[in-house]
Amino acid sequence: MKIHDLITTTDALSDLCERLAKSEFVTIDTEFMRENTYWPELCLVQIANEEEAAAIDPLADGIDLTPLLDLMCENDEVLKVFHAGGQDVEIIVNLTGKTPFPIFDTQIAMMAISQSEQIGYANLVDSWLGLQIDKGARFTDWSRRPLTDRQIEYAIGDVTHLSEIFPKMLKKLIKTGRGRWLDAEMEKLADASNYIVNPDNAWRRIRQPGRNPAVLGRMKGLAAWREGEAQHKNIPRGRIMRDETLADIASHPPKKQADLAKVRGLSSAWRDNDIGKRLMRVIEEAEPLPKNELPEKMKRGAPLGKEGALVADLLKLLLKIRAREIDVAARLLTRADEMEALAAGVRDLKVLQGWRYEVFGKDALELVEGKLGFAVKNGKLAMTHIDDMHANMEEAAASDETAEAEAEAEADAETAAAAAAAE
C-alpha cells in the first residue's frame, strides 16, 4: 500500500479524492480535540482504500476540505467505513449538516459475528490481523504543529489496518447472513438528527426527576439556556453547569439570585454575577411542560415482585446461553430492561419482532410461558423444550421398564434351568 506524505494543499487533496472516488470503499478516521471546547476541533483526517492511504491536515493554511467532504456526503457509490465512528461522523455533520453515506461501522458489525459489544480498535486489529498497535501517541495533542512522524504513522495505521480488515469482515457477514441484523444500528449511525443538538431538546439527555410538568418545564428551559451559553463561549456544557446541578435547580428552584451561592456545584460568584442573573431569568420565565411533551411512562406489565425478578434472571441466563451458542453480542439481541418488561407481561417489544424473535425472542417467550427449561448436556448448560424433556423422561422410563422385564425374564429362565438340572 502506498502511504502519501501529509496532505496540506487543496490540489493534493483533490487529486487524492478523485482517485478514491473510484473505490468500492474507503476507511476513515479523525483526530480531534474537544476537552476544552464545545465544538470538537478537527486536527487530522486519515483515509485509505486497499491501495493507498493519506493523512490530511485540516489546519494547514489555505486548505479547502470541500473535495473530501463531497466524497464523504455526496458520493453514494463509495462505502465509508469507520470504527466506533460516532464522534467522527459528528464532526462531519458539524461541517456539512450531513452524515457520510453509505456508511458502515466495524465496531457495530462485530456485535453480529462475535460476542464483543464495544471492541476497541487495538483488539480488533489483534483479533483479525494478529498485530499489536503502538498506543503511545493515542493521547497526544493533535492540534500542535508540526506533527511528528510518529504521530502521523500512528494515525495512518487507524485506516490502513481497517482497509485490510473490512473485506474479511464483510465476507463473514455475508457467509453468516447476519447483515440485516445491523440495519437498525447502521441507520441510527447515519441519522444526522442524532448529532445535531437542538437546545430545546437538550433536556431529554438529562436524567429526569419524575414527570412533574413544572419541574420538567424548568429543566427544559435551563438545559436550553446552558446549551446556548456553552455554544456561544465554545466551552463544554459541563463547564457551565453539571447535569446533576441543573436537575437539582429545576427540582428546587432558588427564590432569589443570592440563593445560588448555596447550590452545590456553583461558586459563590453566582450570587451577583451576570450569568447568575441570566439563570434566574430563565427560572422565572419557565412554564410547565405541555402534556404532549411529557416523557412517556415506561411500558410495564404487572409489578415484577420476587417471582418476576427470578423470571427476569432466567431470561438473562437464557440470553447468555444463546449469545454464546450463536457467537453474537448479547446487547444486539436485547437489553436488561426489555427482559424485565417481558417477565412482567409486556409483549410489544423489539425482541419479539423480526429477526430478534427468530433468534432469541421465541425461546424467551416460551421460557416465560413455561414451555422451555434448562438442562445440562455434556457439562454445558443448554436450553430444552419441556415437551422434549417429558418425552425423554417417558422414553427413559419405558426403557427402564423394558430392561427390568428382560432382567426378570432372564432370571426366571436361569432359575428354571437350574431346577431342571437338579432333577
Image (cartoon, rainbow, N blue to C red):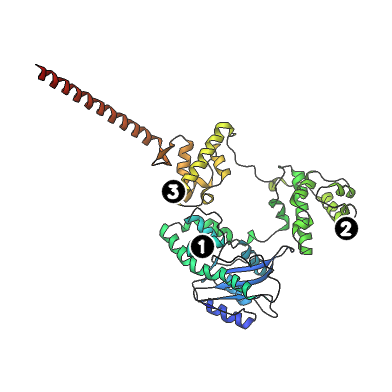
Which one is closest to the eye, mark 1 or mark 2? 1
Q: Nearer the viewer, residue 392 or 363?
A: 392
Q: Position of residue 324 (x, y in %)?
A: 46, 48
The kind of residue on which mark 2 rests is: Asp
Q: Quadrant of residue 74?
A: bottom right
Which residue appears at 49% of the width and 69% of the height?
A: 164
The kind of residue on which mark 3 rests is: Glu
Residue 97 in view of the camera: no
SS under mark 1: helix
Disc assigned to residue 325: 3
252 left or right of 186 in image: right
SS under mark 3: helix
User: How many residues crowd around disc 1 within 10 Å: few (fewer than 14), some, or many (20 or more)?
Assistant: few
Which residue appears at 59% of the width and 68% of the height?
A: 29
Return the disc, 1 or 2, that comes first in the chain's sequence. 1
Q: Quadrant of residue 65?
A: bottom right
Q: Nearer the viewer, residue 29 or 413?
A: 413
From the image, tell me which residue sits under label 2: 274
From the image, tell me which residue sits under label 1: 126
User: How many residues crowd around disc 2 within 10 Å: few (fewer than 14), some, or many (20 or more)?
Assistant: few
